Image (cartoon, rainbow, N blue to C red):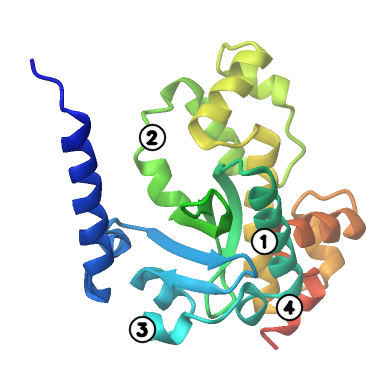
Amino acid sequence: MTLPTQKASEGTLKKRLTILESLSSESRFYHLFNYVEGLCFFAKDKDGILLAANQRLVKLYGFQCEQDLIGHSDFDLLPMQMAEKYRRDDLMIMKTRNPTVNLVELFLNSQGIPSWFLTTKLPMLGKDGQVLGIMGVIQSYEQYKKKLPSHADIQPAMDLIAQNYCEKLSIQKLARLCDLSLRQFERKFRTYFNLSPREYIIKMRILDACALLRKNSQPIGDIALDLGFYDQSSFTRQFKKAIGLTPLQYQKQFL
């Protein structure tokens, strides 16, 4: 086998650069993400201004084409607290240059309806090594779960959670139900869902709370207790952490 010479390698790099610089806007590589089900792509500069997005993210924000979305920031598109949270995450990634991989978090569509997504972000670096901004992908959590291997070994616990997530559930009991130690159960659960069992239960409650708040049919305190939170204060704290708004602020969006 003949190894490539240094001259050939330099020629390849030069050709690569020429091709990349010659690409039309219609041939940008990230447009491939339009054909990956449930996947959104974005790129932002150091100030958090959107520079690029695939069509799925454009539609998610309620725009028609990429050019309409470019130039906006999270503060233009999302609730203030949620935008602030995303900005803090971006600044930390740019500072440390460490990627964030498969972070499970809520994301609001243009109607304010939340869904769970997996977010992966990486710093964008220039040829001189300087940080230019952030790029990342947002993947539908439901689509992600469909691609996971079967979680039959913890299915008894999943069934119990699905039926009783508003109740006080013992993680030890869930582990015993699956004939696993607590440590084995929590490790398997995180492998399958990228969440701890407790985090998974809280997220199910929060999504349920969003649906109830949009109906505006119950007092917030009653919703908190019905969903298994200790009191309205703990519910508000968990809701704001996940959504970026208090339950009352979220509810007012739909009045």
Q: Secondary structure at mark 1?
A: helix
Query: Closer to the N terminus: mark 3 or mark 4?
Result: 3
Q: Secondary structure at mark 2?
A: loop
Residue 24 sits above or below residue 231 on the image = below
Closer to the camera: disc 1 or disc 2?
Answer: 1
Could you give the CA–CA distance between mark 1 and mark 2, rounded to whole angstroms?
Answer: 27 Å
Marks 1 & 2, CB-CB < 8 Å contact: no
Q: Which mark is residue 251?
A: 4
Could you give the CA–CA distance between mark 4 and mark 1, rounded to whole angstroms?
Answer: 22 Å
Task: Write the residue at 88% across / 48% down.
Answer: 230
Could you give the CA–CA distance between mark 2 and mark 3, rounded to whole angstroms?
Answer: 32 Å
Q: Amino acid at mark 4?
A: Gln
The residue where tag 3 is placed is 65
Could you give the CA–CA distance between mark 3 and mark 4, rounded to whole angstroms?
Answer: 30 Å
Q: Percent x, y for residue 136? A: 48, 55
The residue where tag 1 is placed is 86
Q: Percent x, y for residue 109? A: 52, 73
**Dot 1: few (<14), some (14–19), or many (≥20) neighbours within 10 Å?**
some
Q: Amino acid at mark 3?
A: Cys
The residue where tag 2 is placed is 148
Could you give the CA–CA distance between mark 3 and mark 1, rounded to whole angstroms?
Answer: 23 Å
Q: Amino acid at mark 2?
A: Leu
